[in-house]
Amino acid sequence: MPAPPALRLRGVVKRFGEITAVDGLDLDVQEGTCVGLLGPNGAGKSTTMKMLTAQAMADAGEIQVLGFEVPRDSKQARALCGVTPQLDNLDVELTARQNLAVFARLYRVPRHERHAAVDRALQIANLTDRADTPVDKLSGGMRRRLLIARALVHRPRLLLLDEPTVGLDPQVRQELWALIDALRTEGTSILMSTHYIEEAERLADTVSIMASGRVVARGRPADLVLEHAGRETLEVYGPPARLAEVRESAEAAGHRVRQTGTAVAILRAENANGTLPDGIARAATLEDVFVLLTGEEVE
Amino acid sequence: MSAVAAETRGRLRRRLRRLEPAAITGVMSRDVTNFLTYWKATTFSSVLDPTIYLLAFGLGLGTIIAAVEGMEYVQYVGTGMVATAILFSSAFGAMYGVFVKHRFQRTYDAILAAPVSVEELVTAEVAWLGLRAGVYGATPLLVTMIFGLDPAPGMLLVPLIGAVTGFGFAGFGVFAAAAVSKIDHFNYIQSALLTPLFLVSGTFFPIDQLPQGAQIASNFNPLYHCVELVRHAVFGFESVDLFHIGVLIGFAFAMWRLAIWRMEKRLIE
């Protein structure tokens, strides 16, 4: 009998009054893989994350977490999951160690193992020498690492990361990526929602692109790029009037085109046979796919 | 699935019932850890407040009013203030504490992502505030002893009476915190409900001076039953105290369930 997937969603729907936040979502995370849930703000990523821990109730569809039916057996599932929320909700008056100790209890780490579990989590977060510092004296990056460590104190089998690096400096982001990558290498299953393309590209084995509450494409990042954006993208720079012209003629020739601030990017430039204007050719990226499929420009 | 994983799942299925002690004590351990960072401030005001009240009432009103119901006025007020201390510690602690933890600090989002249900979360919060109110409810009594109140064995039951009353008012506070949309709305609850409750509870003057309608109404005031019980614990129990404790237990149970119901609506989308 094959192992059940770490996560399995089928036809999940969530409405808030008139608004349908999640609209027939199918999603799988195989054991030991990292899946990136990539989508613009408002695509339904956070609502999806909340449904996985039964903090939001689906109106329709099936959710299984580590083989447990959610919401019916959600408590059992949550005991084996770690959750890092998008917004910092640490206890700011408590020290790093105290924050971890409280959650070691909440996650039912047996009493005689708690001390070692907290030490191990501090080590993962690289906070051993700041263990007794109150959280409000820690830097933003340290708090974020502590937030992830708190989700790991009971050695979960599935880690749910909701926008793990939102609002952080590039350098701190790199640090966290290294941390998440190490967890994935150790075999923890991970679902990570993000609206940062690079984050998904670097960390995720497979990416599901979400728009308006459903998955519009899924696959390995490289495959998605090849399938939806081709191999090469041509970026043409110029004054606005010229760009409008370029766009029109490229679209007439059957190319997908996107505006990237000061330039026009023409996709599948490899098929053009010299009909396109001069510009800078570059490899197609996941960002091209993202913009193409979600219709949203990247921040 | 491996045998180990299957075994783990089987064990978890059996172990994770409704209202698990491990979940409740886990949430309470968070409260205790936080409390240890601010206990000095809380204890300071819980000792100083009744001292100031007793000085004011004892030296001020006490010179006009010699005795009430056979007690020195300062002892009458001192024993009555136990209920006030319980009310303030539990109801306000729950209203403001829960509102801040839920809406500003998002603590409950973190706790509910762990294997803890809303029912366990609310039970733990209310139980902790009830225990705390039981302890702080005893401080006015200790202060009144400095003002000449004689110790009595019944006083040992005062923390228990305080905990039951505090559990009820903490439940009410959690319910209020879940029901209001803005923190400023607590002003309505405080002025329109809690202040009348504590003034017409027999803390500062006996209820039986009031019109009959108000006397009947005060039977619906849990604080009145608490005041009566505490005075009787100090000066001698009566058979009517079984009725008083019954009302307080009923109030605590009703508020506990009400708090869970409203918090579930608030916390689960």
Image (cartoon, rainbow, N blue to C red):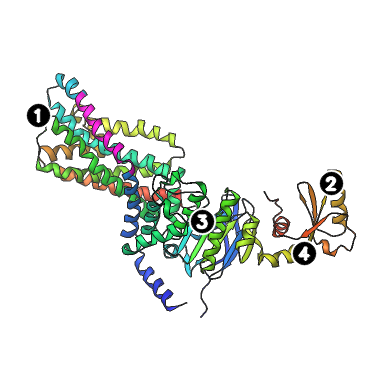
Q: Which mark is residue A230?
A: 4
The Cα atoms of the two marked residues, 3 and 2, are separated by 45 Å
- Residue B123 visible in the displayed image: no
Q: Which mark is residue A172?
A: none
Of tags 3 and 4, the one toward the viewer is 4
**Residue B84: % across, % down:** 25, 35
Q: Give whichever of B121, B44 is nearer the camera.
A: B44
Report the residue marked by disc 1.
B70
- Identify which amino acid the numbered label 1 is placed on: Gly
**Do the dots labelled 3 and 2 sit on one chain?**
yes
Label located before the other in sequence (3 or 2): 3
Q: Residue furthest bottom?
A: A1
**Residue B258: % across, % down:** 36, 48
Q: Residue at x 46, y 44 (%)?
A: B103
Report the residue marked by disc 3.
A50
Report the residue marked by disc 2.
A238
Instruction: Identify the subunit bearing mark 2.
Output: A
Kindly indicate the quadrant of the structure image that contains residue A215. bottom right
Instruction: Identify the subunit bearing mark 1.
Output: B
The Cα atoms of the two marked residues, 3 and 4, are separated by 35 Å
Q: Is residue A219 left or right of residue A257?
A: left
Of tags 2 and 4, the one toward the viewer is 2
Of tags 1 and 4, the one toward the viewer is 4
- Identify which amino acid the numbered label 4 is placed on: Gly
Kindly indicate the quadrant of the structure image that contains residue B50. top left
What residue span does the magenta drawing correspond to? B37-55
**Residue A228: % across, % down:** 74, 63
Task: Please tell me whether mark 3 sits on a helix, a strand or a loop.
Answer: helix
**Do the dots labelled 1 and 3 sit on one chain?**
no
Q: Residue furthest right?
A: A275
